[in-house]
Structure formats: C-alpha cells, structure tokens
Amino acid sequence: MSERPIRIIKGRGTGMRPQARYDEDARAPVDDGWAGPDEGEEQDRPPRTIVVARPGKTIITRNDSPDLPFSQSINPYLGCEHGCIYCYARPSYAYWDLSPGLDFETRLFAKSNAPELLRAELSRRSYRCEPVMLGANTDAYQPIEREWKLTRRIVEVLCETRHPLLIVTKSALVERDIDLLAPMAAQGLAQVAISVGLLDGELARRLEPRAAAPHRRLQAIRTLAAAGIPVTVLVAPIIPQLNDKDLEAVLEQAREAGATAAYYVMLRLPHELKELFRDWLQQHYPLRAAHVMSLVQQMRGGKDNDSRFGKRMTGEGIFAELIRQRFAKACARLGLERRSVSLRTDLFVPPPPAAAPAGTPAQLDLFKPWA
C-alpha cells in the first residue's frame, strides 16, 4: 500500500512507499478537509535526503553463502541515495519499519562510530584475518560519503593494519582514496569492483538516478588501473530486454580501460522489490513491461524471484543459459578472468587495544622485526 498516488520523481528511483512487510499498521492518504494552502505544494516538491547518525553495536557482518566470494563485509550506511530501482538491498528497510521504496533512498542512516568499532574488532585476540568487502549491501561511496567520510576512515584503519580489502561500487568517488588503495594493492591487499550494467545514458538515468554515469564509471576503472589497483567489472544486474544487449560492449570497454576480471548477476526481485520494479516498468517502459517480466519468470521457475543458492545470481532456463554463454565467450575473447585475484592475509598487524593509554605500544609490537 502506498502513502500517496504513484508518481515519477525526478532524480529518484521510485515515487512509491510500499508498506514494509513487518509493519502491521496499514496507512493510506485521507483528505480530512484540513489541508492548508501550501500543503499540496509541499507534497509536490522533490523529497530531500535526510541522514541520521546511528551508532552501531557491531561493524563486521559475516556470511557463509556459497554464492559470495567473501565471508566478511562492512556497510557504513543504511539505505542508498543512488536510488537504483533494482537494488536487492531495498527490502532490508522493512526491518526498520521503513518503506523499501522512497524511504530507502531518502531516509538514510550513517554508522557514525564505524571506524572505532572496526578498530576494536580487529584488536580482539579472537579475530581471524579474512578479506573484508566494503559496499556489499549498500554503496559505501554513495553521495553522502563526500560529507560523512566514514568509508575513507574505514579504509584508513584497514590500510594501517595491512588488512585485505575488497570494494564494490558504482561511484567514481572511489578515486578519492587512491592514495590509500594503491599502496595496499602493491602489497596484494586491495582490489576494486566497479559495477557497470549498461552503456545507455538515458536508461541509466532512469534505473540509477543518482549513481555515476556509465562513462564516468569506465573512467574510474581506467584511473584505478593506472594506479596499479586490480579492477573487476561487475555487469549487474542484467535485465532481459532492457540492458542485456550491452553485455559484450560493457566487457569490451571495461577491458580497454584496464579491468582484468569480470562477473555478472541477473536481476533479483526479492520481497517488496517485485512491486517496485513492476511499477517502474509500467511508468517508463509500459510496452515492454509484460515481456520483461515474462523472461524474468522464465529464469526464476515461473516466479518473480528464486532465492536458492546457486540459482539466485544467475537464474536458469534458456535465457539464463544464453547470457552465461555470451558472457563466457566474451571473457575468453577479451582475456578477462572470471575470478578475482587472491588477497594476502599474512601481513595483518592488529591495532593496539582501544583501552591502552595513548603512546603505549601494542604487545605484539615487541615481536615486530622492524620495532
């Protein structure tokens, strides 16, 4: 159920606020006759982005999914201002009793103590060093990072402790941190994946309204690669009859820019995302909407979504197999690896415990050969 009539809002992925699946209180707009002369105008204004500091209790999220090439991840922000209509992280907002629709991209939370939490976690005796992924759920380099700089401070901690780092983003802001990432990459401690799902600028503006333009992401690949940072291109999500035509062209341009590896993900539509994406199709591509969803369902066993491990990222069926073959042949022709480089874990140096007095060396410092 939406709080107001569905509409297209410039610069936003959706104008919908579907009810969160855990919210027992249904809401609907009602004209009670008390609206003032300016209230209608206020509703027509584009919604502002509101960011609230929300200190966390933990910082590293762990998973054992066979579909993911990492077991640890950090997300400095909840919600994402990029507003990508296809974002699989949107349904997570239901846990906060917020809408996975417009709330997800306008009402954001910053884990203001993330760097301090990370330092404390890495200093624990029980901690075992494994690569950590930045931005696995929501983009760590989304526009609000320019002001909050939480991602920058997290990378500083990882650089200081020589901790292996993976980054996935669709933002060119990652270039800002080359001064940290390049030295880490030289030690085998860092690599970056840039998400480029299409080359059509007009389609990108509708799908990903506040993300960097595709050509700008390709430039980011070029800049990172020139600095010696291994770059993977992530072609995601592949949406039947919308951006699948760009698959080979994206891989070619990414390879020319310096990417050395590639992987792809098919469109996923869990929970409330099904309603949001269907509405977006009707708003922007009404003549193609039925065909797009028909192909999506062919890949998902007749449903809008299939959450099974081994199937949720790539789908199954004729169309999914066609994409798999096209991707494999293009990667072989271009010399793109289909797996990312391995990162070192043997260089990790735990930070001093947070409770240690200023200037007191950590106990392990006594065993450092350079101490």
Image (cartoon, helix red, strand yellow):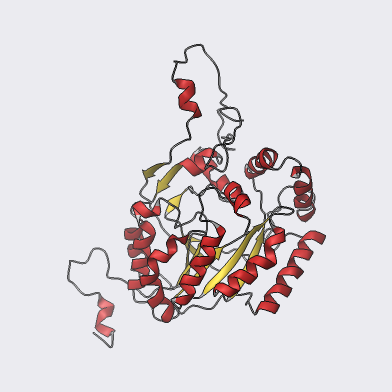
Is 44 on the left or on the right of 280, as rendered?
left
Give the vertical position of 22 relative to 39 (above or below).
below
Tell me which residue sits at (34%, 62%) in the image.
153
Which of 11 and 102 lies nearest the eye of the viewer?
11
x and y percentages locating residue 35 in the rendered image: 47, 15
- For image coordinates 59% across by 65% down, the residue present is 234
Q: Position of residue 285 (x, y in %)?
A: 70, 43
Q: Quadrant of the N terminus?
A: top right
Give the residue displayed 73% in from the left and 54% down from the top: 240
Left or right, 55 with respect to 27, comes to left
Q: In the picture, residue 165 is in which quadrant?
A: bottom left
| Vertical order, 146 against 180 (above or below) | above
Residue 29 location in percent, x, y?
56, 22
- Which quadrant would residue 365 be assigned to in this image? bottom left
Q: Residue furthest top?
A: 33
Quadrant of the rendering where the C terminus is positioned: bottom left
| Residue 314 visible, this orientation | no
Which residue is pictured at 43% across the width and 60% down the height? 173
